[in-house]
Amino acid sequence: MVVTWLSGVYGVTAGCGNVVYLREGLVPDETHAVADAQAMAGRVDPSGRPDPSAAVFAYRDGAEMRSIAAYAKVMLPLSVAQVLLSILLVAASAMALAGRPGSRSFALQTLAANAAFAAIAYVAKTDMREHWVTATFNAAQQIGGDPIVGKTKSSLYWLSAMFLAFFEVFVVGFAALALLSKRTVAFMEAVARAEAQREREDEP
């Protein structure tokens, strides 16, 4: 549950960052981004060879932010929902770690809600994802560099899918299995019995 707590904190941070960015409307400039990436591609790595891949992935960050702004009508409600569900995930994780009564079922419901949202958001972001992947691929061709040209587009799709698989599917699935394990059930039952015993002792 510590991992899910951290995942929730990340979700709150990322969602709030997107909301603030969309409200301020400070979109990174495309022309300067390509020029900066081309300048970075001309630098050499410790072996003395140019390293265009670093420039491409530096450009990718700005391309993703421009795509978020381009699809603000989709990204704003998704970001707000991400913040709300991530807050629930943080609260549910903390309650489960403390062994609070009812926290196990609440955490499982919260995990299910976050998993459903992740799937919906992934589908909703299809056009936005295509936008920044295509922009990054085109910039990679301008920047040059045999190790990345022709492979960047597929690798960026895989990167996005792997991020979803780890931070959404793996974390949520692992947490759900942990909550359903016999050890967790025994721990929750022991805490409930101890709480009931304490209440009986406090009765006049």
Image (cartoon, grey):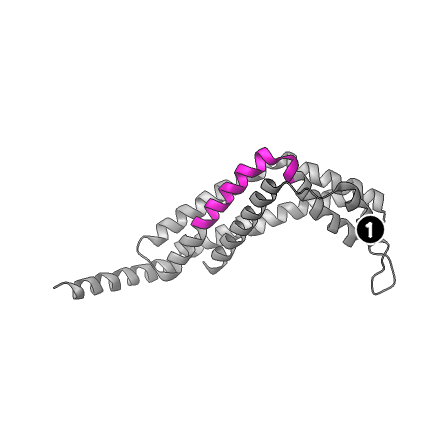
- The image shows residue 25, relative to residue 182, as above or below, that is above
Q: Residue at x 37, y 59 (%)?
A: 184
Residue identifier under label 1: 147
Q: Is residue 114 left or right of residue 102?
A: right
Residue sitting at the far left? 204
Please provide percent x and percent y for residue 77: 53, 37
Residue 99 visible in the snapshot: yes
Dot 1 crowding, Cα within 10 Å, few <14, some 14–19, many 20+: few
Quadrant containing the N terminus in the rendered view: bottom left
Nearest the camera: 25 or 199?
25
- The image shows residue 77, relative to residue 48, as above or below, that is above
Q: Residue at x 82, y 56 (%)?
A: 51
Q: Main secondary structure of the magenta part?
A: helix
Magenta-drawn segment? 68-88
State the image quarter where residue 28 is shown. Answer: top right
Please provide percent x and percent y for residue 135: 75, 39
Q: Is residue 126 left or right of residue 90?
A: right
Residue 80 within the segment the image draws in magenta: yes
Q: Residue at x 77, y 54 (%)?
A: 54
Residue sitting at the far front? 24
Residue 176 within the segment the image draws in magenta: no
